[in-house]
Amino acid sequence: MTTKNYTCKVQQNEGEITILSPAVGIFRKKFKNGDFLCNNAHIGNITILNKDYNVFLPENISGIISFMDDNRIEIPVGYKDKLFSLKDPGSLKKIETKPSENENVSSGNDIIIKAFTTGIFYRKPAPESPPFVEKGSVIKRGELLGLIEVMKSFNQIIFSKESDMEEGIIKKILVEDSREVKSGDPLFIISKVHGGKK
């Protein structure tokens, strides 16, 4: 039987996004204050009449959990009760890799994406979420590859729009999730896509 999914409700105010319960039930959260959530992230489960359902963020909603006022894992909720708040996505710095600073052509068809700063490298938006990209993933210009956290500021690693590649394939991922990196450390090796395919 297919599990039903719910998309949570949101209320947007200046500088803050309030995440609201999609139904009446028992909500079990997956995250804590300071975690980064991207759009469509699986934020937890809700039990309604002894049945469990997945709860997801809506599209185009992302940010850092800044206020989760209940430390319980299971929380009774009503329809549109507040679950937690997210910092405005504007607090996320979008830094594109630039060939002059962060990319080196290692062979005729490969690019090395390097860390643009020292911090903690994250391959995925939250501990239980899938990675942004995997080995073998086909990516396009402007696509998010990972995050580097510097003093609670999450900086996006974007496949450069200045690269001569329209598309690439993740050939190697050189750093594990949640590891400290230094500026200039290689993170990804990306190969050209020949003929638009792998």
Image (cartoon, grey):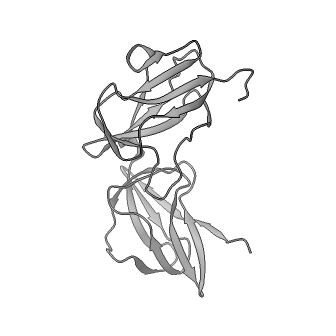
Occupied quadrant, residue 83: bottom left
Q: In the rendered view, would you say 89 is above or below 45?
A: above
Q: Nearer the viewer, residue 123 or 7?
A: 123
- Of residues 24 and 173, the one nearer the viewer is 173
* Number of numbered tags placed on the structure image: 0
Horizontal placement of 137 versus 162: left or right?
A: right
Residue 182 in the figure: left or right of residue 134: left
For the C terminus, the quadrant is: top right
Single out the residue that lies furthest toward the left.
151
Tell me which residue sits at (31%, 74%) in the image: 71
53 or 63, which is in the foreground?
A: 53
Expressed as whole percent of the image width and height from the top left, the position of residue 162 reads 51, 17
In this view, 107 is above or below 26? above
The image position of residue 116, as x and y in percent, is: 35, 27
Residue at the image point whose x is 40% and y is 63% from the top: 31
- Horizontal and vertical percent position of residue 37: 45, 53
